[in-house]
Image (tube, helix red, strand yellow):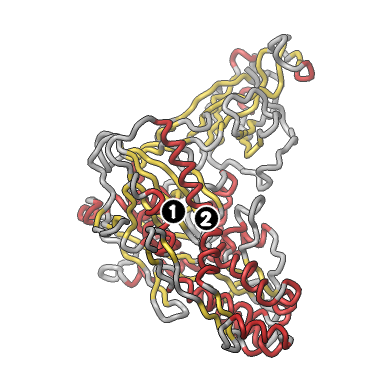
Amino acid sequence: MIVAIDFGTHGTGFAWATVSALQDAAGHRVVVYQPFTQSGGHTYPKDLSAVLVDRAGEPVKFGEKARNAWDRELARGNPQNFGYASKFKMAIHGREGKSDIPEFQGRLAGARRDTVKDLVTAMLMHVRGAALDQIGRYAVGGAAYTADEIRWCLTIPAMWTEADRQFMRTAAVSAGLPGDAERLLLVQEPEAAAVYCALNAGTVLGPDRPEGQLEVDTPGSRFMVVDCGGGTVDITSYQIRAEGVGPGQLKETRVADGDRLGSAYVNHAFVTDILTDRFGEQQLKQLVAAFPKEVGQLESDWETEKVRLVSETAADGTPVISDTVLVSIPGKIWDALDESTKSRLTVLASGETHYIEITAHEVTKLFESVVRPILGTIERQRAAASGDGPPVGREQMLLVGGFARSTYLRDRIAQRFGHEVRVITPMDPAVAVLGGAVHFAYDPSIIWGRRSKYTYGFGCSMPFRHGTDPLEKFFIDDDGNEKCNDRFVVMARRGDLVPTDHQALSTVAVFPKWTSVQVTIHATYAHDPQYTDEEGCEAIGKVIPDISGSVGLPTSRRSLDVAFSFGTTEIEVEVRDRRSGAARSADVAFDDLYGRGSTDRPDPSPGR
């Protein structure tokens, strides 16, 4: 059994497929999706990514049920001191840049990173339970699937760091998912979408909008996946290897790009631009404090109207939004406004009271605040891909993710790139990542290789280079050799294409008297780093090998084999004592402070 979970900023869903000979043919594989009922009554393959906690901080409700319960609590003044969180996936990668999208209210206001981990764990535990419950209903002859018969797969943004990925895996294991890397896979969202689009028909964006799907019959042809979700936009480029889509046939051609440009930022612009303009900055703050439920209703009503908007084509071929949007102002907010504000709102709403009217021009500006940077990010990735030489056949672009349901976004991308690129979107772009994750977990070998996001390596001492190495790093080792401390041993360089089954190997020496040693893993954007403490180089994890079996042996007979595996969505590191055979591996403790650097050196680094 294969079960995939797509944990998103706005929504979270799961899907599954049974493993059998009949299912091995990917083109005929049956994937079961779980529908959820949304607030408007329609179904969607995801429930809201939201958690309600009680006064003790224990999760009590999830998804739409959590939001509805929170609204009821707010109407009563939250007498039970509950807490509510939504969009908290964005807090995982919230150490830099935009971090204003996650919502933490009530007793969760000002949530710290450890609280975010608890919320992610609780959400995954809830989804795991719901998935097992649904799968149990499909059991044949009453025989349910046992835990060791299920392989799970979690989707992650391509822009996440190794620390973010380790955060997600740790939370998943805490939620009851298996710790075995073979039974808990992580897949980058654009990769999953690429697999889905290679197997399912979609729409080719353009004047006639014919049906079509990713063409995979031309060896060497390139395509780009633009995954537009609720919180992020991830862009990854791939090339089809000579054998076509099948075992090991997709290779990543460029380092993934992306940014915080999801649909949630259109909603954020509604608050910062429209509500601030209509109410005034100070009065809006007062309204949020006094009537949080009602302000939340304003945002919810805008979201409902936003998804209904349909792009049209102007005479010059430019996509436009020609409809105005009316958002009802809740009575409590209206009654709290001063007369001058009421009068101004009434005039702006063409004489209607209790409404905010958003003009077509304003609506377009809200979308453009996000769409324009998305186009720039796509252009940047295309420019980088041009360095690989002219394409074989016509280039293709896959547009997926929940935000890809927006006709305005689709039309803007088609207008900008459609004359050069074949732009395809699935029939339902919101399920592409989830469905593709199921197919990927069924056969992970479909991805042949990935581009290294950083230059990775570890620190050790090396022979001192007079005239090159700084004198402060000079020392004499136990064998009387002149050495340089803190040298960077490169195991993969940024942009390298690393096959999924590839291991980078290195051997380092250990001195006779040492009873402990630490191999510290480093990452940097630099292509050829020399030292582990140079600017931009960060310690992202460590492995402390067992060297007790070789203490006292001369350096010539005492060494460690260091192996890095980069081809999966996470780094796997193994350090083995060559003499005793003792190995420590896999569980690399990634630092939550990734990006800030660390100078802690509790154990010496090995030498060469």
Quarter holding the C terminus?
A: top right
Whether residues under marks 1 and 2 lie with C-beta atoms below 8 angstroms apart, the answer is: yes
Amino acid type indicated by mark 1: Asp
Front-most of 231 and 280? 280
For residue 235, say whether it is visible: yes
Q: Position of residue 299 (x, y in %)?
A: 57, 75
Q: Would you place residue 114 above or below residue 222 in this image?
A: below
Q: Position of residue 384 (x, y in %)?
A: 46, 36
Q: Which residue is mark 2?
A: 232
Q: Nearer the viewer, residue 338 or 471?
A: 338
| Disc number for residue 227 | 1
Q: Nearer the viewer, residue 155 or 258?
A: 258
Task: Identify the residue at image location x=70%, y=32%.
Answer: 535
Secondary structure type for disc 1:
strand
Question: Where, quadrant-wise, is the N terminus in this rendering?
Answer: bottom left
**Distance (Cα) linking label 1 and label 2:** 8 Å
Question: Measured along the vertical axis of the image, is residue 103 above or below residue 382?
Answer: below
Give the SS element for disc 2: loop
Residue 514 badge = none
Above or below, comparing residue 400 to residue 160 in the picture: below
